[in-house]
């Protein structure tokens, strides 16, 4: 006579294993889906980060070119100032001898001084353009840093998703979700604030 009720433990064990596998399969599918979404978002954020830094580099290059042009204008300005001073000083010996200087000397001095004003205005305009390009480039570099941080958070979220899939750990997956959502939010903020 059996000592206790006989239970078919093989069937019970199979039912438990099937339930665990079914539950684990849903978790793995959810982890895979969230990780794939984070990977796609990280790819787009990475492209945006690269695009903004490239645009910033182009603007900084343009700013440098404008600075070189402004420097050339200031050198030209100084040359005109030297010419004006020479034209002014060339009148001195004539006046010291109580003779009239050549008629073109006062006109040359006035012309050089007028040209200096035009050159200074052009140099100031180039400097203003330079400053605008530089400020815009700095803004883009700032945006780039935000996109780069978003990519980093998304990549860590993806890595945690892989760990969660290997260990079938819901808490690790939750951490993956939190980091991925934070990275996605940072990326969205960068797009909207641009």
Image (cartoon, rainbow, N blue to C red):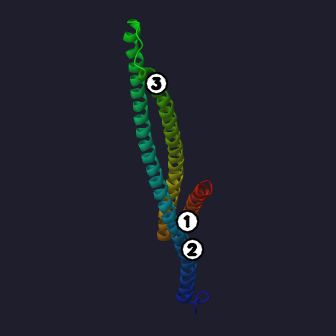
Q: Nearer the viewer, residue 155 or 27?
A: 155
Tag 3 near tag 1, CB within 8 Å? no
Image depth: mark 2 or mark 3 in front:
3
For numbered disc 3, what is the local secondary structure? Answer: helix
Q: Nearer the viewer, mark 3 or mark 1?
A: 3
Crowding at mark 3 (Cα within 10 Å: few <14, some 14-19, many 20+) = some
Badge 2 or badge 3: first in the primary sequence: 2
Question: Which quarter shows the C terminus?
Answer: bottom right
Q: Where residue 142 sits in the image (x, y, percent)?
A: 53, 48
Which of 129 and 98 lies nearest the eye of the viewer?
Answer: 98
Residue at the extreme bottom of the image, as rendered = 1
Q: Position of residue 49 (x, y in %)?
A: 49, 57
Q: Are marks 2 and 1 in contact (CB under 8 Å)?
A: yes
Q: Position of residue 10 (x, y in %)?
A: 52, 88
> Label 1, on which residue?
173
Give the structural element (helix, strand or loop) at label 1. Answer: helix
* Secondary structure under the numbered disc 2 in the rendered image: helix
Q: Earlier in the sequence, mark 3 or mark 1?
A: 3
In this rendering, the answer to whether 30 lies above or below 160 is below
Residue 30: mark: 2
Real-space Cα separation, disc 2 to disc 1, in angstroms = 9 Å
Q: Is residue 10 left or right of residue 95?
A: right
Residue 107: assigned label: 3
Is 3 drawn above or below residue 174 in the view shown? below
Specify the quadrant of the image occupied by residue 84.
Answer: top left
Examine the image and state in which quarter residue 13 appears. Answer: bottom right
Ranked by sequence position, the earlier of labels 2 and 1 is 2
- Rounded to the nearest whole Å, what is the CA distance between mark 2 and mark 3? 85 Å
Q: Residue at x 62, y 88 (%)?
A: 5
Q: Kindly indicate the quadrant of the structure image that contains residue 184.
A: bottom right
Question: Disc 3 to disc 1, how far (Cα)?
Answer: 83 Å
Q: Residues within 10 Å of mark 2 (few under 14, many from 20)?
A: some
């Amino acid at each position: 006579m059996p000592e206790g009720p006989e239970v078919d433990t093989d069937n019970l064990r199979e039912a438990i294993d099937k339930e665990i596998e079914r539950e684990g399969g849903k978790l793995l599918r959810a982890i895979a889906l969230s990780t794939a979404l984070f990977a796609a978002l990280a790819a787009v954020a990475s492209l945006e980060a690269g695009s903004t830094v490239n645009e910033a580099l182009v603007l900084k290059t343009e700013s440098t070119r404008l600075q070189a042009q402004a420097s050339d204008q200031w050198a030209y300005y100084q040359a005109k100032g030297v010419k004006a001073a020479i034209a002014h000083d060339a009148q001195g010996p004539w006046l010291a001898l109580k003779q009239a200087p050549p008629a073109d000397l006062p006109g040359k001095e006035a012309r050089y001084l007028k040209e200096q004003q035009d050159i200074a205005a052009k140099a100031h305009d180039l400097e203003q353009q330079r400053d605008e390009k530089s400020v815009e480039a700095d803004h883009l570099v700032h945006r780039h840093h935000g996109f780069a941080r978003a990519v980093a958070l998304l990549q860590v979220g993806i890595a945690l998703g892989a760990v969660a899939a290997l260990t079938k750990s819901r808490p690790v997956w939750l951490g993956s979700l939190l980091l991925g959502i934070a990275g996605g939010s940072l990326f969205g903020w960068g797009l909207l604030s641009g």
